[in-house]
Amino acid sequence: MLITSHAVCAPIVDVREDGVIRIARMTYTDSEGRISIRHIMESGKNGQSVPQTLYDALFDEARGDKIFPVKILSSEPILTEFIDEEYHYGGTHLKVAFPAYVPEQYLRAVEAVDKDDPDETHGPIKMVAIEDWMREARGTVPFHIRVTRAVLVWAATNPRVCERYYGTIRYLRGFEELTDDQKNAIATYTKKW
């Protein structure tokens, strides 16, 4: 397996002291007018590393190129997936998710045109309760739903989160462990985190 490209998802998360999880959501309207609920996500460009792509996604999408306080909440991805590379035959596209914290007042409050495809638009970014995100996102892009579930599992190390969301967490299917081939591919990927 050879990783030839990557994309980084940056779910913006606020875990409150009482265990409530708030998570950012934005609508995404594609060129055919279909609307889905998504997290911030960016593909690596021009030789970027995964951390560069992560920060570009946050600064480009969250507030439109302005600098603001941001904290990456996990040094390792909370979700890692591999798909066949669309543009490099025989290659593999790596998709990872890192939760981040951005103060709510810094989130983009207006609609924005997608920088890579001007026929697509991103709605304002709003913080909502994680259970509302999951309810609203049914039927949307499966990767973004899996990222939201991964946020719940990641945050459940907090006893208040675990207690509050136990009924949901206990029904989530486990995330598959990476195979040795996948671990080796990540180890040799020069643009990793």
Image (tube, rainbow, N blue to C red):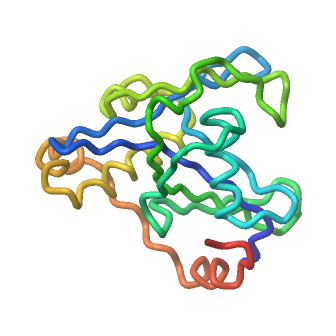
Residue 130 at x, y percent in the picture:
33, 34
Which residue shows up at 64% across the image and 25% down it? 28
- Please tell me which residue is depicted at 29% across the width and 40% down the height of the picture: 21
Q: Quadrant of residue 65?
A: top right
Residue depicted at 38% across the width and 50% down the height:
151
Residue 69 drawn at (x, y percent): 52, 47
Residue 172 lies left or right of residue 79; in this view the side is left
**Count of labels in the image:** 0
The image quadrant that residue 54 belongs to is bottom right
Q: Does residue 129 sit above or below 56 in this rendering?
A: above
Q: Nearer the viewer, residue 58 or 135?
A: 58
Q: Where residue 71 sits in the image (x, y, percent)?
A: 47, 54
Closer to the camera, 71 or 82?
71
Is 91 left, or right, of 169 in this rendering? right
> Residue at image x 66%, y 25%?
122
**Image quarter (top left, top right, bottom left or bottom right) of the N terminus:** bottom right
Q: Quadrant of the C terminus?
A: bottom right
Residue 25, image x and y in percent?
49, 30
Nearer the observer, 69 or 184: 69
45 to the left or right of 142: right
Residue 79 relative to residue 188: left or right: left
- As drawn, 75 above or below 173: below
Q: In the figure, 66 relative to 139: above or below?
A: below
